[in-house]
Image (spheres, grey):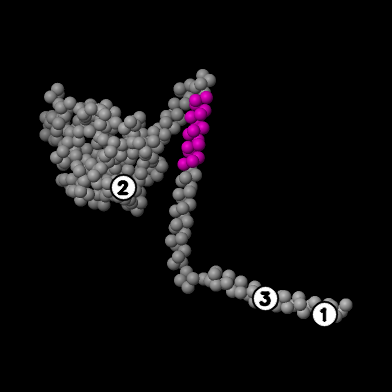
Amino acid sequence: MSAGMAHTKPEASEVQLNGTPELMDLLHIDVETDAVDPKPGREDLPCSRNVLRKQRHWEKQVAAKKSRRKEEKLRRKMNRELESGTGTEHQFTKRVMKAITKERLAEARSTGLKLCVDLSMTDCMSDKEISRLAGQLRRLYGSNKKVTRPFHLFLTDLREDSRLYRECVRMNDGFLNYTMDITDESCLDLFPPESVIYLTPDAEEALESVDADKVYVLGGLVDESIQKKLSLSRAGELSVRTARLPIDEYMVKKDNVKNFHSKILAVNQVFDILLTFCDTGSWKEALQMWFPPGKGYVVAGGDSPPPPTTETHRVE
C-alpha cells in the first residue's frame, strides 16, 4: 500500500513538473504581449481619439433614433386624437409644427435644392464682422425652417477651430443641432464643378431659374468686409460658373438724398429672395418682398421681363 502510494507521488510530481514549462511558456507569452511600449503615449493618443470619435458618432445615432421614435409617437398620437375628434388645433399646434418642420428639413437632405455658403473668406474679417455673419447664418436657417419646401443647406470651409464656428455656437442656440451639413471641405469636394453656380453681384450673367440639378453657392461675406469682386475672384479660383440676381432686369435706381445705390446683400437676404422665387416663380415678387429699400432700388413697372416658368425651379 505504501509502495503504491510512493509510486503515485512521483507521477503526480512529474505531471506538475512536466506542466510547469508549458505554464511558464504561456506566462512568458503574456508578459511579452503586455510588455510596455518603450515610448509610452505615442500610440495611445490617436487610438483614444478614434475611440472618442466613434463613441460620439454612436451617441449621435442613438439620439437621432430616439428623436425619430419620439416624433413618430407624437404623430401617431395626434392622428388618433384627430380621428376620434378629441384633438384640438390649439392643443397640438406647437409640437406638431416642430415635428413637421424637422421632417421637412430631413427630407430636404435627400430631395431639396442644394445651397452652400462658402465660408473660406472669413480669416480677414474683424470680430464684429464675424458676429454679424453668424447672425446672418442664423436668420438664413430660420427662413429655411419656415418654408414648405426647404433647401438642403451646406456650410462649407467651416473649421471647428475657427472664430466663426465658435461665434455660431455662442450666438446661435442649437447651432450644433441645425439640420444642415457643416463641413470644413470645399463645395468642390462635395459636388462636381459643372454643377456649381456661384452667386456674386459682379457676375455678368443674370440668374434666370433655380434648377434641381445645380448647386448654388453664396459667398460668406458681410457688407463691411466686401472688397471689390472678392466673391467673383473666389469663383474664379474654383473655376465654376457665376451668376447674379436679376436686379438690373427687374429693378431701377431710385433717387434718394444720399444718392446711394448698392446691389450687395447679406447672405440671408439673397437666400430669402431665392426661397420666394422658388415658391412663387416670380423674380419681381421676390425682389419686391426682400430687396432692402435702403439700397436705393425699386422694382420696375410693366416693362420688366416676364418671370421664368415655375417648372424649372421646383423639386417635385
Query: Residue at the location (43% across, 61% down)?
Result: 46
Dominant SS type (magenta):
helix
Left or right of 297 in this view: 70: right
Mark 1 residue crowding within 10 angstroms, few (<14) / some (14–19) / many (20+): few
Work out whether mark 3 precedes mark 2 in sequence or the reverse, and give the earlier one.
3
Kindly indicate the quadrant of the structure image that contains residue 307. top left
Is residue 119 in view from this perspective?
Answer: no
Mark 3 and mark 2: span between their CA atoms? Answer: 62 Å
Query: Residue at the location (19% across, 38% down)?
Result: 244
Task: State the residue in front, 155 or 138.
Answer: 155
- The percent coordinates of residue 21 (x first, y second) are 65, 76
Kindly indicate the quadrant of the structure image that contains residue 115. top left
Q: Identify residue for label 1.
A: 6
- Magenta span covers which residues? 64-80
| Disc 2 element | helix
Question: In the drawing, what numbered circle is on residue 190?
Answer: 2
Q: Identify residue for label 3.
A: 20
Of the two numbered discs 2 and 1 in the rendering, the one whose residue sits closer to the viewer: 1
Left or right of 258 in this view: 224: right
Work out whether mark 2 precedes mark 1 in sequence or the reverse, and give the earlier one.
1
- The percent coordinates of residue 243 (x first, y second) are 19, 39
| Disc 3 element | helix
